[in-house]
Amino acid sequence: MKKVLTVMLVLAAVAGFGMAAEALDVSIGARHAGLGNISGVGSMNGMWQIEVLVGPLCITPGWLTDNEGRVMMTPFTFGFIAKAPLPFISPYIGLDLTYYAETSSKDELFNKVLPKIIGCSTDLMAEIQKYGFGDGYTTLWGIEAKAGVEFGLDKAVRIYTGIGFGYTMISANFGSGNVTFGIGSVTWETGFRLYLIGRPKDEHGNNPAVPGVKK
């Protein structure tokens, strides 16, 4: 899996910046995604995010809630995607880096969030805390390589779905030092995009949704 992840990262980098020189897409949208085991914490087993796509660059803030609907973390994703510019179905590959900003208290983080991510009991987490785990800072972040397909509903609105492989990384104080470890998992995403610039062109090179905009 690590070799697959490395290959996908290289392909995404080369293809993403290569296609960026050819066309500039600008879109807004939303997505529902799960990254690593953290997907088990959020609403409907995932996190909700608002997406802004400019060329290959993707900026995606969002929120992640507990089972009671309270916001536990606010994930912020920065990444890029590379798409094959086809009229109706466009395959894509990409890379996402996500930082999970804490909005919960330390007690909620260790008693509700981390046990679900790690897959351990709250009693075990309480026992670990006695030895100084997380006395200072605790940082969560993730990296994901993905691939999927974008479908065209019309010339401007498109939906997409994809899968990938990612790691949720946890860094925390432990005793006099700190410890960092990661949990790998298959990932998924689904969402929609409304293209403002760079929508598919007709046979004359015009953008049908925006009169006067030519290729």
Image: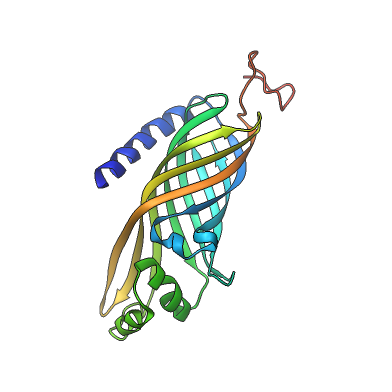
Comparing 186 with 140, the one in front is 186
Residue 52 at x, y percent in the picture: 58, 45
Residue that lies at the very extreme toward the bottom in this rendered image: 130
Q: Give residue 84's position: percent from left, percent from top.
A: 47, 27
Residue 8 vs 114, above or below: the answer is above
Residue 33: % across, % down: 50, 52
Specify how the rendered protein is coloured. Answer: rainbow
> Which residue lies at the image location 35% right of the left edge and 69% below the top edge?
119
Total number of numbered discs in the rendering: 0
Residue 141 as seen in the image, left or right of residue 24: left
Q: Residue at x 42, y 44 (%)?
A: 163
Instruction: Name the quadrant of the C terminus.
Output: top right
Q: Residue at x 40, y 31 (%)?
A: 15
Please state the horizontal and vertical placement of residue 48, each as a whole percent of the image: 56, 56
User: Which residue is at 51% across, 26% downward?
Assistant: 85
Reply above or below: 169 against 7. Answer: below
Query: Viewed as shown, does residue 191 lie left or right of 138?
Result: right
Out of 117 and 7, give the one closest to the viewer. Answer: 117
**Quarter assignment of residue 171:** bottom left
Q: Residue furthest top?
A: 204
| Image quadrant where residue 117 sits | bottom left
Q: Examine the rendered structure and indicate whether residue 159 appears above or below residue 73.
A: above
